[in-house]
Each structure stands twice: as C-alpha cells, then as structure tokens.
Amino acid sequence: MAHILLVEDDAEVVGYARNLLEGKGYTLDVAGDGEAAMVAYMTRRPDLILLDVFVPRIDGLRFARGLQERFPLDRVPIVVWTGAYEPESIGDLLDTPHVLHKPAASDELIEVVGRALGQETKARALRVLVVSERVAALRALVEELRAEFDVSTASRWDEALALVDVRPYEAVVVDMDVEGTGSIAERNGAGILRTVHARHRDTARVALIAPEQERFGAELASSGAAEVVLRRPWDKGALATELHAIVG
C-alpha cells in the first residue's frame, strides 16, 4: 500500500488523518514543519504528500517549491489540505490539481488521496537512482525508465551518496560526467559507483560512459564497481533490459 508524508502541525488533525489513512491500509510519516518534511522526504521518499499550507519554520508552499527545485523529476503527487485558501486559488500558487478545503469529510479525503495516487495497488516498482549533472540526460533517463521503475534523481556527488545511504535502491545508474568538489579523491561518477559497491553490495550498479571514457568503463567493470557499462548513446530500451537482467 502507498506511503504518505503528512505535513501538519495540528495534533488533532494529525490524529484524525492517521486513524483514517492507516485504517485504509496506507503507511504514514508525519512532519510538523517544512524543514522536518524535507528531512522526512530525503529519508524515505513518499508516494504522496498531504500538505498543510501554514506550518512552522518553512511553510507548506515554500516546502513544495523547494522540493520541486531540488528534485524536479520526482513526480510525487501533492494534495494540498488547507483552510487558508479557496481550492481554486491554490493552482495559482502551486502546480497541483489536488486540493482539499479543511475541514474535509473522511470520504472526500480518501477519494482525493486515491485519485492522486492513481489507485496504484500494483506491486512496488523497483527503485532506481539516476545520477547526472546534465539536466537533459536526467530527463531522458527518467522518460526511458519511469514506465517500468520507480525513478529518483540526483545531480551532485554528495546528494547521490546521501540518498543511497538513507533509501533502499535496487540499482544506481551513474553518468560518468558527474563531478564534485572538495579534497577527497574521486568525487565523480566513478567514485559514486565505487562507494556504493563498498557500502551497499545489494545495490546494482550501471555506468554510462562517453566514447572517450572507455578506460573508465574497463576499470569499473574489472573492479566490480560497475556490473554493467553502457556506452552513450545506447539503443532505446537497452538500459531497462540491462537493469532487469541484474535486479530481476
């Protein structure tokens, strides 16, 4: 069943939502402010966010906009649940069609949550993290994989490793052009794969290399840091086929 992140600071509303949603089989994380919500999202990406607008520290709208800026290709639906705005005005403030006005009847809340989730009762898709500094590459990879996998994205060395450390991914796909800063050696795509190989043996690893990066590909394959090396560009569908081959 789907996992929901509830961003809400009213204990009574939290209790009402928890009883209702958990009674329907959903699992629930609760964050009482926008900063805590961002930490919760990074720790365990939800299938849906149920968002109050007026919460402390970072309000709901700023949280949602920050989320969309940091993870522009994550397509986690947001249901705005507020008594502060009329539903028709929320569309001008935040790009979501799912708006509930407080107080909402229990059947209305369940109906909107179900609609936002698309009633996805199928088994959880395999989680894949795609890492590239190039926005165009990230977009192309997400478009290719999202029909078959639950795809997350990262564009920085440190962000990618932080995500792998806190979330269960079946596979990591790394563009060898990714770079980083600092004094630690190999803060780049090869470094990500070697670190994942050392820390998370159950996570499959795919390297995407340019034609001039054959040496990197050979070294990563021979060391076991990459289980699959694909040369850019690859045939359409080849990446999904390779992922299925190594993660099932």
Image (cartoon, grey):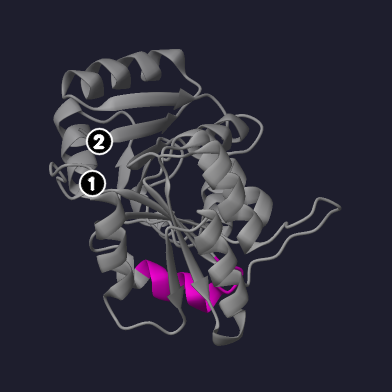
Q: Label 1 belongs to which residue? A: 117
Query: Looking at the rendering, which quadrant does residue 109 occupy?
Result: top left
- Within 10 Å of disc 1 (Cα), the crowding (few <14, some 14-19, many 20+) is some
Most distant residue in the front direction:
222
At 24% across and 20% down in the image, what residue appears? 22
Give the number of the disc on residue 93. none
Whole-percent x and y of residue 141? 40, 70
Above or below for 30 versus 34: above
Q: Is there a contact, CB below 8 Å, between mark 2 and mark 1?
A: yes
Whole-percent x and y of residue 133? 61, 69
Give the number of the disc on residue 2. 2
- Within the magenta stretch, is there residue 203? no
Whole-percent x and y of residue 71? 52, 56
Check disc 1 and give the amino acid type.
Leu
Task: Tell whether 39 sits left or right of 238.
Answer: right
Above or below for 172 versus 30: below
At 63% across and 72% down in the image, what residue appears? 177
Segment colored magenta: 132-142
Q: In the structure shown, which secondary structural element does the residue marked by tag 1 occupy? A: helix
Q: Main secondary structure of the magenta part?
A: helix
Check disc 2 and give the amino acid type.
Ala
Query: Looking at the rendering, which quadrant does residue 244 occupy?
Result: bottom left
Whole-percent x and y of residue 18? 31, 18
Q: Is residue 20 at all visible to an observer of this figure?
A: yes
- Within 10 Å of disc 2 (Cα), the crowding (few <14, some 14-19, many 20+) is some
Q: Of circles 2 and 1, which is in front?
A: 2
